[in-house]
Image (cartoon, rainbow, N blue to C red):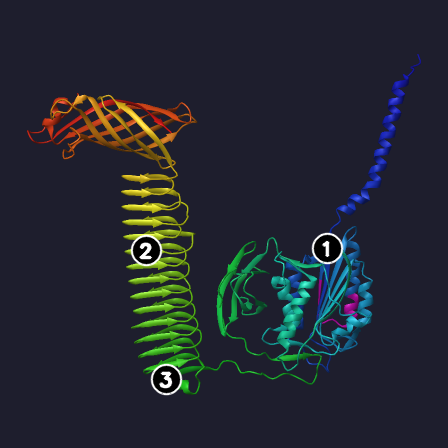
Amino acid sequence: MTHIEPKNSRARRIILFLAGAIFLLGTTLLTPATASAQETTRRFAMVVGANNGGSDRVMLRYAVKDAQSFAGVLEELGGVSRSQLEVLVEPDPSALAKALDKMDRKIQSSAKGNRAELVFYYSGHSDEEGLLLQGKHYTYAKLRARLEEMPVEVRVVILDSCASGNLTRKKGGKRTPAFLSDTSTKVTGHAFLTSSSADEAAQESDKMEGSFFTHYLISGMRGAADTTGDRRVTLNEAYQFAFQETLQRTERTLGGAQHPAYDIQLSGHGDLVLTAYSEGVAVLRLDSSLGGKVFIRGEKGELIAELQKHAGRPIELGLPSATYQIQLVRDGKVERAEVRLKRGQTSKLDASMFEEVSIERTVMRGDIHQQTPVLAEPTPRIPIGFDFLPWIGVSSVYPHALRRFSFNLLGGVSGGLHGFELGTLVNIVNGDTRGIQIAGITNVVANNTRGGQLSGVANLTGGNVRGGQIAAFNITRGQMTGLQIGASNIAAGGLLGAQLSATNIAWGPAKGLQLGAVNMTRQEMLGLQLSAVNLQLGGDKGKGMQLGAVNYAKGLSGAQVGAVNLRTGSGRGLFQFGAVNVSSSPVEGFSFGVVNVSPRSSGSFGIVNVHWKGDFALSGWANSEGSLQAGLRMGSGKATYNIYSLGISPLRPSSSDGSGPRYSIGWTWGVNRQLSERIGVQADIGTQWLLADIGGFARSNFLHKARIGPRYSLNDRVTLHGGPSFNALILTDPEDHRQNQPFGWGIEGQPGGTDISFWPGLHLGADFF
């Protein structure tokens, strides 16, 4: 039997077939566009270092080291992976040509379907014709032609060598300002950066252990050149920074001013980002308050980065995880700090210290005849110095010498000390001190002290102190890191350690311990103040404890323990223990005292608790013994409350004449907890002073009451409460009250003595908000 397919079924199949064909065609046509949208940039780098320019050239010291340092920055911050990086050391022209061919093949095989960029860096000898590799030329023309053959959208060429500016002129390149906006990195073309002009020698420094140009280029790429603060360093920012710093530093060398040159021909929108340090990098943040020349040295003393820091804006640098010595030169003095950087963390720096920078010995790159002499002798050093009086003795010949050991009969002066100094009356040191100074009257250091100072009267330091000061009066102008012991201690720059004296003053932030009769810090205190009077006058981020008769804090999170505790600023988790506790901001902790005053509190335990931003209500209740009470309920805002009340017992007449009612004045303290929106529970204790009549204030009869029970809110304005109570009646005038005493059990006193009665009871009342 022949099956005949319905017409509508055949039509459905044709429609499905056409739809599938259109879908496949669309997918095929759209695939390239999608791949293009997901295109990524891959950056390749070839870094070449050559100290050997030939037998007729001076052997350079640091060209290879510069190349290795530059390669490290590219790998760490420049987006160049190890597989995309080639480092050549001391190649000849043939080896360089082979390496360029290898890089060409690597780019073609690795960057398929992706955007590619190439960075070529050379540090070594050159002349007006080309690079000098072991006495042989690799010409600029050949280098430019070979690099332009590379299958990349952008090529950046950096030459740190003599007469390298000729490279920028082979094709008519002009020195025109590079204006590159920051809207996109989709640029194409080339950028040639050279360390010197066509007729200048590039110079390297023994002090830097590298060339001026590469040193400042790397400093800029680590973040010193970041003028926008976006943690990215662009090509234009890096060049401008290296140009200005190289020119400034070489103006005073025998080789003369060195002018880096460039030929930048990039098209498209945006600037080319050379380095970025937004994630996973150890970041050093120089505070906006710092200003001066900053030197960053590694754990072995090597100079890592250098920059001129201007006050008013912070600067961030991306560095490997390590410990660094930071040196700041400003206002004719040198300061130093040590900082440990960890990957993925930002470390803030607001003080630094080290020695002055002397003029460097330099060598011309490519010049076979000249080598600069040392233009300035370093600070003289002597092992032992002896003075009779300041500037009478060794100091009359070597007043600025750095001494290892110094002995002064009455007093002496030196340019610096890196050991031990002993003086009968006075010791004066104009530079850094490392070790210990001992004097009968006074030790004076103009800059910084590391070690200790011991004297009978005073220790004075113009900079920072790391170690200890022991004297009647200890004063340090900078930060005190360590211990001060005396009658009066002043750390003008702040405290990191301890001050032990009658009067302790830290004019900056204090971290540690102040122990004395009066302790004061002008900024926040992080630690413990222990004295009769403790003052924290500034800052609002203090954390720790004040323990004394009177405690004042501008801002504190921690505890105040004293007769009077005052806080005018903010802070979290504050506990106050004292007769009077006052805080102008909410206490997110507890206050224990006779009088507690604050806007709100997590809990106040005292006789008088005032919280002007807490809960207020009119409260009234009736007791089973026949008294009526009404008063003002004041809550801390959270857990505790007080009720100040007046009471009347209309059913229990006064025993004075048997006609009038009995009155009472009451105080109640309690805690409450809300279980749901409407239901809660409360418990309190209180005392009622019972009066036989209005004029019976002299009588001492008290009813003490403990209550517990539920609370139920009818609405936002009315809350009902009630429950059992336990009562204790103390009658010091029993004849007036015994006849009206409620049922219960107790202890009956002798005539004219005291009666005590106990009984359970009930209470029922309402609060009106």
Q: Magenta segment: does it hold 97?
A: yes
State left or right for residue 539 relative to residue 325.
left
Task: Check the picture and name the quadrant holding the N terminus.
Answer: top right
Q: Is residue 515 visible?
A: no
The residue sitting at the top extreme is 1
Question: At 65% from the left edge and 74% from the top edge, which residue is drawn?
Answer: 247
The answer to whether mark 1 and mark 3 are in CB contact below 8 A is no
Identify whether 105 is placed above or below 596: below
Q: Nearer the viewer, residue 611 or 426?
A: 611
- Marks 2 and 3, the one that precedes in the sequence: 3
**Which mark sits nearer the N-terminus, 2 or 1?**
1
Q: Is residue 347 left or right of residue 252?
A: left
Which part of the image, by quadrant, shows the C terminus?
top left
Q: Is residue 5 above or below residue 178?
A: above
The magenta-colored residue range is 86-98
What crowding class fits label 2: few (fewer than 14 Cα within 10 Å), some (14-19), or many (20 or more)? many
Q: Nearer the viewer, residue 508 or 361?
A: 508
Distance, label 2 to label 3, CA atoms, is 43 Å
Helix, strand or loop at label 2? It is strand
Check residue 534 in the rendering and tell me which mark sits there, or answer none: 2
Q: CA distance from mark 2 to mark 1?
A: 57 Å
Please tell me in which quadrant of the rendered image residue 346 appears.
bottom right
> Measured from the top left, where is residue 340 in percent x and y?
51, 60
Residue type at mark 1: give it.
Answer: Thr
Give the CA separation, mark 1 to mark 3: 66 Å
The dot on residue 387 is 3
Q: Nearer the viewer, residue 76 or 201?
A: 201
Farthest right residue in view: 2
Give the amino acid at mark 3.
Asp
Residue 600 sits inside the magenta stretch: no
Amino acid type for the residue under numbered disc 2: Asn
Tag of residue 185: 1
